[in-house]
Amino acid sequence: RKEVEQDPGPFNVPEGATVAFNCTYSNSASQSFFWYRQDCRKEPKLLMSVYSSGNEDGRFTAQLNRASQYISLLIRDSKLSDSATYLCVVSRGTDKLIFGTGTRLQVFP
Amino acid sequence: EPEVTQTPSHQVTQMGQEVILRCVPISNHLYFYWYRQILGQKVEFLVSFYNNEISEKSEIFDDQFSVERPDGSNFTLKIRSTKLEDSAMYFCASSAGTMPNEQFFGPGTRLTVL
């Protein structure tokens, strides 16, 4: 079983739409959870850390369910510039990051 | 805003040659990492480095690989004898080490082994 699993997509949505991505992780010892975005042939860029209580940053909302080992990302009012691959990432502390394969999002006009 | 930098952006080498990839982590960070991404695949951990020693390494990081922090700013990855399958994007990352230990990535070095 993969350590971090994501639906690869692509998700094709019109501008202004709301889109949600899900991710599951297999190691219950995971302590830190993140969403990164990656543009084509560029580095992963930290979008947000994910906290147990859930957290929001502008149009982005992340949720964590430790019991189900499930992480989600909701993007409201999608912009063309949101088109990218969204990487679900977990870690056990100061350890390595473990990446999912990513979910591709394409926002069209 | 402080950022991780990497040089070169692209390195082309012949199989069997040695390459050194260079990184300058964010200045007050204490933890340093190398990752790689083969085209079309996910980002994979190679090695982590803290307090001037390797803290963890993956199965990929065999005897052909080494890391060094030769001075107070640079962090290098050396591949002694490159293979075709080493062709990938190599990313350096650094973190302050405080939870949740957010890691910040450099722009990467694209290594092409011919």
Image: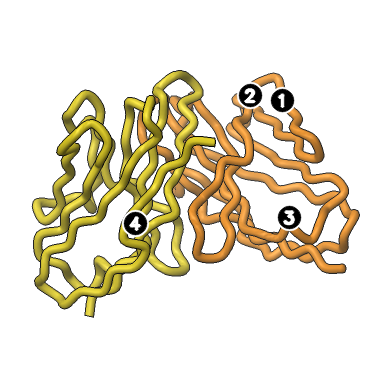
* Front position in the image: B65 or B27: B27
Q: Are marks 2 and 3 on the same chain?
A: yes
Judge from the rendering whether residue B90 lies leftward or rightward of residue B79; answer left or right.
right
**Relative to A106, does residue A44 appear above or below in the rendering?**
above
* Front position in the image: B21 or A78: B21
* Front position in the image: A72 or A2: A72
Provide the letter of the chain coloured orange: A
N-terminal of the pair, mark 3 or mark 1, is 1
Q: Are marks 4 and 1 on the same chain?
A: no
Q: Identify the mark at residue A82; answer none if there is no mark.
A: 3
Q: Are marks 4 and 3 on the same chain?
A: no
Residue A89, percent from left and from top: 52, 41
Q: Which residue corresponds to the image point at 88% horizontal and 54% vertical from the top-left? A: A17
Residue type, label 1: Gly
Q: Identify the mark at residue A51; answer none if there is no mark.
A: 2
User: Which of the 4 image quarters holds residue B103?
Assistant: top left
Callout 2 secondary element: loop
- The mark lying in front, picked from 4 and 1, is 4
Q: Identify the mark at residue A26; answer none if there is no mark.
A: none
Judge from the rendering whether residue A53 lies leftward or rightward of residue B67; answer left or right.
right
Residue B10, percent from left and from top: 34, 68
- The residue identified by callout 4 is B90
Callout 1 secondary element: loop
- The residue identified by callout 1 is A54
* Front position in the image: B35 or A88: B35
- The mark lying in front, picked from 3 and 1, is 3
The span from disc 2 to disc 4 (Cα, nearest Å) is 29 Å
The span from disc 1 to disc 2 (Cα, nearest Å) is 5 Å
Chain to which the residue tagged by mark 1 belongs:
A
